[in-house]
Image (cartoon, grey):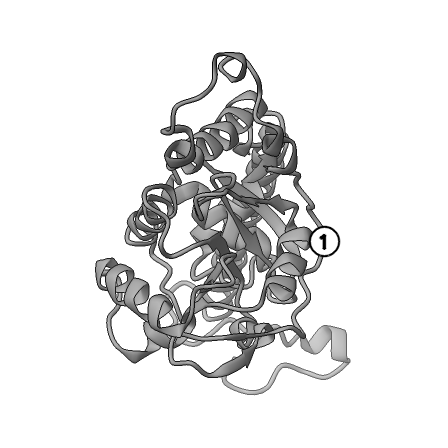
Amino acid sequence: MPLAARVNAGRMGMVLAMMPALASPLAPAQVNQRPAFLDEVGLEEHLGARVPLELTFQDSQGRTVPLAASFAGGRPVVLALVYYRCPVVCTMVMEQMVASFNQLDYAIGSEFNVVCLSFDEQENATIARAKKNEIIPQYTRRVGQEVSDHWAFLTGDAESVRRVAQAVGFRYKKLPNGEFAHPIAFMVLSPEGTVTRYFYGYDYPPRQMKLALLDASEGKVAQSIGDRVLHFCFQFDPTAGAYTIQALRVMQLGGVVTVVFLAGLVGGLLFRERRRRRRMAGQSQFETTPGSREPVSSWSGREQGNPRPAGH
C-alpha cells in the first residue's frame, strides 16, 4: 500500500473508532476544529524495534503468561493491537486477518503464531475468551487445540500494554465515551520479537502475507523450492508499501538456472562421448584377422628376437 494510502487508512481507522464520540452535537465553533486528541493518535513504523517479551499478560483462560510464550517454537508472529468490545474496526481487522490466513498454505501453529492484545485495560479474560470463540471458528485451514494454543487473545494492565504499543509505534487514545481512537494496522514480527512488517487497512493479500512471514523468518518457514524462489525474487518496496518483484534478482536466478542447464548439457554430452569411445575400444580389441576367428595378436617375434611359435 503506498504511503498516502497507508496514511489515509490510519486516519479512516481513527475516524471510525471515534464515530460514537462525534455523534453528540457540537457547538458551532467546534465544527471546523480538528479534535485535539488526534495529535495523540497515529502509527509510526518502528521496523527493527523489539517488543518487550518479558512482560506478562492474561490469556483467555485467565492465566498469567509472558509475551515470550507466543514466540516459542521459532515461528514469526502476527501481532494485532485491538480492543475486543470495539464496535466496528477491530472485529473487521481480525475477520480480514482470518480471511487472509485461510488462503495461505501456511498454518497457524506450524509456520506462524498470532497474538491479539487488547489496549483496553478494563477488558478481562472473559471478554477475551468471548472474542476468541467468535473469531477462531472462522479459521478453516486447521481446527483443534493447536490453533487455539497458538492464537493468543491477551489482556493486561495499562502500562504493560502501552510499552508494547510504544515499541511498535502504535498510538491510541481513550475517548470520553469509553471508546478508543486508534489506527487500523497490525504487524508481523520475527521469532525474536523484532518488527519486520506492517499491514494497513482491511485488505491483506495472501501473497503479501506469505512474503511477510517468509521475510520475518528469514526464509525458515519455506516449505518448498517455490517458496524459496518467491522469497528470493520479491523484496519489500517502502514506497509502494508492498512486496514487488526484483528484476535484478530474477535475472540473477535466470543466470544461475542457465549455467546449471548448460553444465548439465555439456556434462551429458561428454559422458555419452566417453561411453562411445570405450565401446569402440572394446570392439577393436576383439577384432579378428581375415579367415580366422582368433583375435589379432600384438605379439611380434621379430621385435622380441624369437621365432614365431609353431602353428602361426
State which quadrant residue 298 falls in: bottom right
Q: Is residue 110 visible?
A: no
Q: Is residue 189 above or below residue 251?
A: below
Q: Is residue 311 visible?
A: yes
Image coordinates of residue 86 in percent, x first then y, are 37, 49
The residue tagged with tag 1: helix, strand or loop? Answer: loop
Q: Residue furthest bottom?
A: 310
Q: In the picture shown, does residue 69 fall above or below 96? A: below
Can you say whether 127 is above or below 255 in the image? below
Question: What residue would you read off at disc 1?
Answer: 49
Give the class, few, some or many, for how many residues have Cα within 10 Å of label 1's Cα (few <14, many ≥20). some
Q: Residue at x 51, y 28 (%)?
A: 11
Q: In front here: 88 or 241?
A: 88
Q: Residue at x 53, y 17 (%)?
A: 30
234 on left or right of 97: right
Q: Name the outermost residue toward the front.
A: 27
Q: Position of residue 54 (x, y in %)?
A: 67, 75
Q: Amino acid at mark 1?
A: Ala
Indicate left or right for 229 with 300 as reference: left
